[in-house]
Amino acid sequence: MSDKKSKPEMRYCARCVYPASSAAPLVFDESGICSGCKTAGQKAEIDWQRRKKLFERLIDEYKSKDGSNYDCIIPVSGGKDSYWQIHIIKSYGLKPLLVTYHGNNYTDTGMKNLLNMREVFNVDHIFFTPSIRVLKSMNRLGQLIMGDMNWHAHAGIFTYPIKVAVQQNIPLMIWGEHGFMDLGGMHSYNDLVEFTYRYRHEHCLRGYEWYDFIEAASKFGEHLQKQDLLPWIYPSDDEIERVGVRGVYISNFFEWDANEHGPLMVEKYGFKEAEEPFERTYRKMSNLDDMHENGIHDYMKFVKFGYGRATDHVCKDIRSGLMTREQGIEIVKKMDHIKSKDLYRWLSYVGWSEEKFDAIADTYRDPRVWWIDNGEWWKNNINGEPSSYGKVHLDKEDWNKFFVL
């Protein structure tokens, strides 16, 4: 049984529903408003016509003058945001090269959207899938060493398209939104922040690189060598400098609101939302490229930090004025904690038991959020009331016995 004096008290934003334990770093002002809400509020103050002109000057500088190469690269998953990025680029008559990292987890609807995208936009598309054996190893190792089976996918989309840019001598890369700025207010919209290796390494990849998986493979009995991990090896500084690779976020130049451009992509290009609702969020247009992103991968965020995808989407919709904070709280209470059924697909995929998954997951509980009482995990919810969320599956001292793969 825990010492009741040691129970953590979680702070939540007074405007949205983000906790101080947010995976996307944020801070609170003197009124209790988080930096994500403050940054989102800047959108109404921006002269978007001026930003559009800045973008036009940018693409005029980088587009192929003689038609001997592509004008830019767009890393795409085939989701509504990918559609919108291509929609903007094609509206200027540019010739993009699309690059997709396929992590072997597409939903049926997500794959249909990906294939439809190439046709409706009349674009060239590189579609890359790593070895399935290697992907399974990366899933297991990611869960073991950082509690994230989808690290390979984050690293893939933030590495492979840049390798293509270097190989094809295409300097301009068009990204969608800066995730940590959009969620937690890491930067101001006035910064016009661009993609950097540091952001990729420290935040998107959590400080890990391909060589950490070589070391982990040796420790946990997997079989990986450097040649297996070529898709996740970032180009050298010399290669980046030779081509002049530059990654810009289109959300700095055009007002980004998925609730508006999502339906527009349905109407204009036949984008399809999920046929069945997700278990852990109410939105049906997000993360169709990976069945685990809204599912068990996101459940791990709840295990670690005490919140999930429903919180992310609620915060966006509160900031956009589409729901009240009270409505958002009710959604979060119903959805954030759900252990979704896609877990069983993943367990079969990697050859693990649910007991092993739960035991390893327990070792990643954030002490700012969780405490143990009578053999169960507890946390304080946004309404200030503590609730229990299942039994403690394993003491950290004993978890090594579960590392027999």
Image (tube, rainbow, N blue to C red):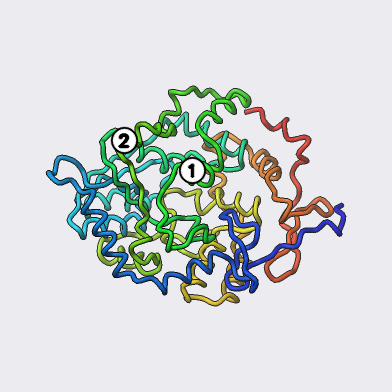
In this view of the protein, which residue sits in the foreground, 25 or 384? 25
Residue drawn at point x = 52 percent, y = 61 percent: 185
Image quadrant in which you'd find residue 381: bottom right
**Residue 385's x, y, as percent?**
75, 68
Q: Is residue 211 above or below residue 299?
A: above
Q: Is residue 339 above or below residue 167?
A: below
Work out whether mark 2 precedes mark 1 in sequence or the reverse, and give the earlier one.
Answer: 2
Quadrant (top left, top right, bottom left, bottom right) of the C terminus: top right
In this view of the protein, which residue sits in the foreground, 323 or 35? 35
Q: Is residue 399 above or below residue 36?
A: above
Q: Which residue position is annotated with label 2?
A: 166
Q: Separation of disc 2 and disc 1 at Cα?
A: 18 Å
Q: Which residue position is annotated with label 1?
A: 198
Residue drawn at point x = 59 percent, y = 28 percent: 216
**Residue 58's x, y, as percent?**
27, 55
Q: Hey, what amino acid is under mark 2?
A: Val
**SS at mark 1?**
helix
Residue 68 shown left or right of residue 282 in the figure: left
Residue 296 has which mark? none
Q: Hey, what amino acid is under mark 1?
A: Arg
Q: Is residue 339 above or below residue 68?
A: below
Residue drawn at point x = 38 percent, y = 41 percent: 101
Residue 14 shown left or right of residue 6 in the figure: left
**Residue 345's x, y, as percent?**
52, 43
Around disc 1, counting alpha carbons within 10 Å, would you say few (fewer than 14), some (14 to 19), or many (20 or more)? Answer: few
Residue drawn at point x = 40 percent, y = 68 percent: 259
**Residue 209's x, y, as percent?**
51, 34
**SS at mark 2?**
helix
Image quadrant in which you'd find residue 213: top right
Give the foreground label among 2 and 1.
1
